[in-house]
Image (cartoon, grey):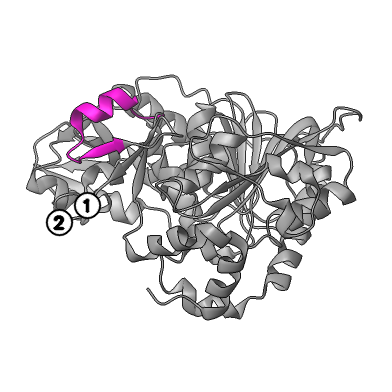
Amino acid sequence: MKLPLAFTERMEKLLDDEYGEFVSTYDYEHYKGIRINTLKIPVDEYLKITPFKLKPIPWVKEGFYYMDDEQDRPGKHPHYHCGLYYIQEPSAMIPVEVLAPVPGDKVLDISAAPGGKSTQIGAKLQGEGVIVANDISPKRTKALVKNIEIFGIKNFIVTNEEPKKLATKFVEYFDKILVDAPCSGEGMFRRDPKATKSWNEFSVHECCNMQKDILQWIPKLLKPGGRLVYSTCTFSPEENEGTIDWFLKEFPEFEIEAIEGIEGLDRGRPEWIGASSQLTKAGRAWPHKINGEGHFVASLRKKDNSILSSFKPFVLNNKELDEFYKFTEENLKIDFKERLHRVGNRLYAIPQDIPELRGINVVNTGLYIGEFLKNRFEPSQALAMALEKEDVTNYVDIPSESIDAIKYLKGETLLLEGEKGWNLVCIDGYPVGWGKQIQGSLKNYYRSQWRML
């Protein structure tokens, strides 16, 4: 791989004796990983049914390396469309492990698209608490919503806002915040060789300014005693130790914490930038020291010395839902106890204890349940992904190796016998979408019902 000359000259100066080992990693393929979705299947159960050759990733119990060849193509397998796993670079799984969200936490992923870290957070919450997944790019929020919905996460909101606007609504609201910051992306050169060509388009100075523009609003968003994890996929000390050194000086109510339990993670290098020695508590993932790409991560705690703010609660519009209740009576075996909120003809399930959101750009006001049409309710793809086959009155189960599984994922009608009306379509027992049984055939609602924003 041809690397930018300015990059190699700088890294050689910084790494000194380690440089030869570091630069030799660019002669090899990058490591590839999947992370099993424990909202849908326990790790040990997935390992029994997986068609792939998997090797554990040391720092994530749900994470596994795989070989990307003609036999092992996780992105092509029906299990991917069932949301049983997420394809993710192994080092990119580290920041959420450091954040360590637990059920009940209120978590903000402030630069969330395309959703890898948000799905990791959502799985750790196990349906309790709330995740607000935000991205500044309207286009990127489409992939963000889709990936969260595939995972079957219910307790989420997706916003498309500047951090400044979020801070007006979520004042000291979050227990934990992840800032996976925009950066120069040097750590991804091996994974994406095209990144070497765009490297010069964004200067380190510009990246640092973007990072500071985000971080300056974190103190208003985070609860006293809450945790902030800052991460990048660059080696640049200015964007890593330098940015966090600036933050700690600007906001002395924060202190940096040591990172433990991540095998192979190197220490921070404050001496490269003249930063505080406290920055040795940060972590660096190097491609010559771990089986993964370059990453930086720092964990900070907001000191518990201020008063918690209150917020104006979200007011539900749960009127005119008769057609939805008719749908649930006919098609679900479970009591649908979610907090329902109608926006126009669309119905959402709203997480508990969220503030009133008027004034900010909300892409998804919770889990999208479906749409009210003339004299009927039509369920969404997202609802299908949030259910289990035991939750519904009728379902069809298709083997992943069958031609019907491929046909369904292509949007084709299936010639299957079944109970008339809505059927939850499953592959190997795991929901993948809806079908409607009509006279010996199953009308496909997979592609038509995957919500286009």
Q: Position of residue 145 (x, y in %)?
A: 49, 51
Spatial distance from mark 1 to mark 2, Cα to Cα? Answer: 6 Å
Quarter holding the N terminus is bottom left
Of the pair 167 and 19, the residue shown nearer to us:
19
Q: Amino acid at mark 2?
A: Glu
- Position of residue 363 in the picture relative to residue 205 (left or right): left
Among the 4 quarters of the image, the one containing residue 325: top left
Residue 278 can be seen, yes or no: yes
The span picked out in magenta is: 39-55
Tags 1 and 2 touching, CB below 8 Å: yes
Circle 2 residue: 70
Which mark, by number, is residue 440?
none
Percent across and percent down for residue 258 are 68, 34
Q: Which secondary structure lies at badge 1?
A: loop
Q: Amino acid at mark 1?
A: Arg
Q: Which mark is residue 73?
A: 1
